């Protein structure tokens, strides 16, 4: 079309993963457009606690990625909670696994940050970076794949073209649908209950997770200037037939149920913010790339929140694709070349699938309630705790210090 607006890369979806990819592609010297169906700037959802309900456990690799993009220092550091210890155990069990930054000779295991804080920093970075144009409150209505470019029609009639279109538009990706990517999915029959709570005892900068009878419950430490160490973000993955009942409990009853389910590890629950319930489903694209089209983040894979790795995997996708795009610039090749896009897919798909399989295995293992299985789980935890070399290697991978990391994350 003669009135088309042309770019090297179109990123559909301006959330944390898509926004970071746009910045990475621009740093590689490419002209970039971001298409976001809503607003790039996040709407506040904070309640009585002052904390946003949506938080991410950012590992070292993801933090390095944000530093590479130049946005880390724009995150409000008073709201970055570096955690130094992690504890995992089973309700009514005898086994427990713990990890500590001190044992690994590192400053911390990672940090808990509200998604809004990360998004605000990324939006600021986009606004001050030349070569990026934003299209907000606009949805993609059609995708037109040609030999040397892909066209995108927007809801207001705008027509854009690019050598590469990237779907970073979440688990219900429109790009994935329009491009005809095949997916596999299944329902977890769980819902995630998320909120912020104030506890009687301080969190001591420790992330904790217990496997309860109705599903895994995580308490993630929060930090805010002027507040003490008593606020945590909770994520409780609850089987569907009990999730609504727990969600609807009166506040005092919910506090008691939550503290009891957490075995009073942090004492009583003193305050509870607004609660949210999110359905959980696992889905993955069988392929991440086509000529001129690629998928990243939840558009490519949606994982159970059990290990808190969702956004870290998405940032790994964005960083790996950024390195691939930088290579095409150096070699004067099209960013939409299937040859180079397949390199991105090879680097990311196997790792993501392995993580998804591991989380599915853990989920099924801890759903089994037979006494012999419970005994084996507890013995397994004790065995794992007594093998420091294995703990150390697993911890290094989890905190983003090893594994298939692109250079921009190391």
Image (spheres, rainbow, N blue to C red):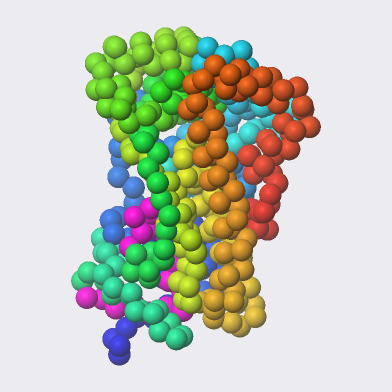
Q: Identify whether 188 is placed above or below 383.
A: below
Residue 11 seen in the current view: no
Residue placed at 33% from the left, 69% from the top? 178
**38 on left or right of 305:** left
Q: Position of residue 317 (x, y in %)?
A: 54, 57
- In the image, the segment drawn in magenta is 157-175
Judge by depth and name the residue closer to the eye, 250 or 222.
Answer: 250
Asked which quadrant contains residue 192, the reply is top left
Residue 403 seen in the current view: yes
Q: Identify whether 57 is placed above or below 73.
A: above
Judge by depth and name the residue closer to the eye, 100 or 345.
Answer: 345
Inspect the magenta stretch and tell me whether residue 159 lies in it: yes
**180 on left or right of 319:** left
Judge by depth and name the residue closer to the eye, 70 or 397.
Answer: 397
Residue placed furthest toward the right: 389
Residue placed furthest toward the bottom: 2
Residue placed at 46% from the left, 85% from the top? 148
Asked which quadrant contains residue 341, the reply is bottom right
Which quadrant holds the N terminus? Answer: bottom left
Q: Identify whether 76 is placed above or below 376.
A: below
Residue placed at 46% from the left, 54% from the top? 284
**248 on left or right of 271:** left
Q: Position of residue 392 (x, y in %)?
A: 74, 33
Inspect the magenta stretch and tell me whether residue 147 lies in it: no
Q: Position of residue 254 (x, y in %)?
A: 31, 16
Q: Position of residue 396 (x, y in %)?
A: 70, 39
Residue placed at 58% from the left, 29% from the top? 83
């Amino acid at each position: 079309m003669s009135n088309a607006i042309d770019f090297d890369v179109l990123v559909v979806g301006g959330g944390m993963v898509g926004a970071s990819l746009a910045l990475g592609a621009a740093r590689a010297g490419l002209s970039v457009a971001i298409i976001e169906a809503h607003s790039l700037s996040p709407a506040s959802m904070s309640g009585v606690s002052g904390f946003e309900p949506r938080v991410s456990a950012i590992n070292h690799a993801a933090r390095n990625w944000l530093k590479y993009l130049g946005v880390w220092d724009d995150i409000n550091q008073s709201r970055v909670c570096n955690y130094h210890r992690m504890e995992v155990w089973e309700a009514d069990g005898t086994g427990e696994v713990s990890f500590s930054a001190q044992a690994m000779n590192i400053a911390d295991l990672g940090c808990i940050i509200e998604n809004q804080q990360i998004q605000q920093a990324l939006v600021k970075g986009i606004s001050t970076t030349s070569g990026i144009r934003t299209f907000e409150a606009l949805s993609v209505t059609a995708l037109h794949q040609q030999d040397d470019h892909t066209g995108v029609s927007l809801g207001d009639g705008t027509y854009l073209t690019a050598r590469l279109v990237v779907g970073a538009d979440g688990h219900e990706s429109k790009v994935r649908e329009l491009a005809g990517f095949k997916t596999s999915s299944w329902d977890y029959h769980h819902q995630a209950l998320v909120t912020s709570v104030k506890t009687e005892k301080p969190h001591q900068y420790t992330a904790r997770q217990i496997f309860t009878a109705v599903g895994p419950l995580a308490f993630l430490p929060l930090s805010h200037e002027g507040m003490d160490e008593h606020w945590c973000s909770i994520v409780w993955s609850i089987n569907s037939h009990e999730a609504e009942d727990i969600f609807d409990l009166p506040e005092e009853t919910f506090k008691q149920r939550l503290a009891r389910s957490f075995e009073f590890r942090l004492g009583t629950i003193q305050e509870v913010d607004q609660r949210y319930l999110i359905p959980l489903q696992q889905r993955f694209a069988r392929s991440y790339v086509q000529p001129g089209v690629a998928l990243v983040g939840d558009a490519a894979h949606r994982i159970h929140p059990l290990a808190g790795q969702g956004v870290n995997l998405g940032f790994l996708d964005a960083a790996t694709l950024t390195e691939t795009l930088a290579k095409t610039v150096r070699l004067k090749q099209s960013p939409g070349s299937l040859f180079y896009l397949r390199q991105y897919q090879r680097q990311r798909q196997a790792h993501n699938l392995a993580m998804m399989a591991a989380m599915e295995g853990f989920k099924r293992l801890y759903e089994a309630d037979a006494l012999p299985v419970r005994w084996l789980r507890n013995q397994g935890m004790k065995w794992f705790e007594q093998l420091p070399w294995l703990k150390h290697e697993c911890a290094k991978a989890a905190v983003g210090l090893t594994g298939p990391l692109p250079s921009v994350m190391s």
